[in-house]
Image: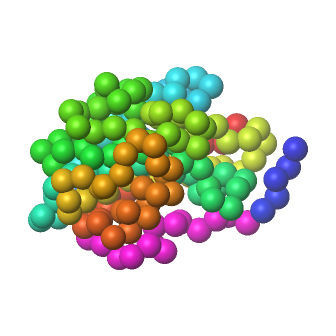
Amino acid sequence: MSIDRPVTPDPYPLLPATASFTVTSSDVTDGQPLKDDQVNEFGDTSPQLSWSDVPEGTKSFVVTCFDPDAPTVSGFWHWVAVDIPADVTELAAGAGASDDSLPDGAFHVRNDGGVVGFMGAAPPPGDQVHRYFFVVHAVGEDNLGVDGSVSPAVVGFNLAFKTLGRAIIQGTYAH
């Protein structure tokens, strides 16, 4: 099956401008294919992420993984972890397994696969290369003001008003 369509633009420059800061990963190399661990059929393990040089006034973080290349008008949210405390500067590989894998006070929002936690890359077989944007959002409030019952879109809406900065690292994957 061929899903012939144009490449979706990088969605983050379309959002309100914010400061940038640094995110690194021992599992994701920016612009390169994801490891099997981060692929749905092989591992479903969220990658290790570390961040630094966060904006002054940061009181919490939200970590997301978004695939704008999914064959939908809304892309596909693979991971949404909310209310990570400001003193946390790293998530270990596998932190997306469950709420118990996150720092105290943090929680997951159900991803677009219907799972609470991380869902690895899962593009349709034969589709174009998909991009997976792992983003650490620095938030200017202790909590985002949502709970685990909201959709990723509601988290994104709240981030539009409360984000002080973003750090982005992008992996790719194709079947």
Q: Residue at x 21, y 33 (%)?
A: 104
As rendered, which of 53 and 88 lies closer to the eye?
A: 88
Asked if the magenta segment contains residue 8, the reply would be yes
Q: Main secondary structure of the magenta part?
A: loop
> What is the x, y in percent for residue 41?
62, 25
In the image, residue 167 sits, relative to residue 103, either above or below, namely: below
Q: Is residue 149 left or right of residue 23?
A: right
In the image, residue 103 sits, relative to residue 170, either above or below, namely: above
Magenta region, residue range: 6-21
Q: Which residue is drawn at 60% across and 38% down?
A: 113
Asked if the magenta segment contains residue 134, the reply would be no
In the image, residue 17 sits, relative to residue 145, either above or below, namely: below
Q: Quadrant of the C terminus?
A: top right
> What is the x, y in percent for residue 169?
40, 52
Q: Which quadrant of the structure image shows residue 15?
A: bottom left
Q: Which quadrant of the structure image shows residue 120?
A: top right
Q: Which quadrant of the structure image shows residue 122?
A: top right
> What is the x, y in percent for residue 95?
34, 30
As rendered, which of 71 and 9 lies closer to the eye?
A: 71
How are the colours assigned in the image?
rainbow
Residue 40 visible, this angle? yes
Q: Residue at x 31, y 26 (%)?
A: 101
In the image, residue 58 sits, relative to residue 91, either above or below, namely: below
As rendered, which of 128 and 161 lies closer to the eye?
A: 161
Q: Residue at x 40, y 32 (%)?
A: 96
Q: Quadrant of the N terminus?
A: top right
Q: In this view, does 130 lie to the left or right of 95?
A: right
